[in-house]
Amino acid sequence: QVQLVESGGGSVQAGGSLRLSCAASGYTSSETSIAWFRQAPGKEREGVAAILFTGAGNRAHADSVKGRFTISQDKAKNTVYLQMNSLKPEDTAMYYCASGSPTVWWSRWHRSTDYKYWGQGTQVTVSS
């Protein structure tokens, strides 16, 4: 059973930074990716960034966060990070990490239905 535990959320002012962590355990070879999603009240869940464990270690970021957010991993710690810089009020949401195996990775990394295991979420609030 894969378990994911997020941490690092909090409240910051616009322009500030936060680093989210996703600690993973119980992995099997069938899980190839970890992604970060976010969901604001009244909005759909949005794929923010994802990283592929195998092959070239692909990384993808949503257009809304490119240049500001960076996903990375520490394999020794089984942890995936989301470094968030230049935060904006519109980044306010609950952030979740998820593991799965999206097929056609570059086309599907952001689809929540391709991820089987989810963490409990960590809240990020950005004030103007």
Image: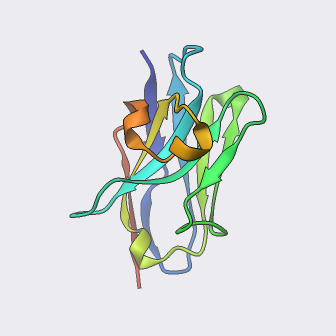
Q: Residue furthest right?
A: 56
76 w.r.t. 57: above or below? above
For the C terminus, the quadrant is bottom left
Q: Is residue 68 above or below residue 113?
A: below
Residue sitting at 52 percent across and 33 percent down? 102
Q: Position of residue 96 (x, y in %)?
A: 41, 46
Could you tell me which residue is drawn at 56 percent across and 66 percent down? 63
Answer left or right for 121 relative to 74: left
Quarter of the rendering containing residue 116: top left
Q: Is residue 49 above or below residue 124?
A: above
The answer, for residue 45, to whether it is visible in the render is yes
| Image location (x, y in percent) of residue 109 | 53, 43
Residue pictured at 55% horizontal, 60% vertical: 62
Residue 43 x, y percent position in the rendering? 27, 62
Q: How many marks?
A: 0
In the picture as drawn, the residue positioned furthest to the bottom comes out as 128
Q: Is residue 109 visible?
A: no
Q: Where is 14 relative to 107, above or below?
A: below
**In front of the other: 52 or 119:** 52
Residue 26, position in %: x, y?
50, 16
- State the residue lying farthest toward the left: 42
Residue positioned 45% across, 31% down in the render:
4
Which residue is more in the foreground, 30 or 2? 30
Image quarter where the N terminus lies is: top left
- Whether residue 16 sits left or right of residue 52 in the image: it is left
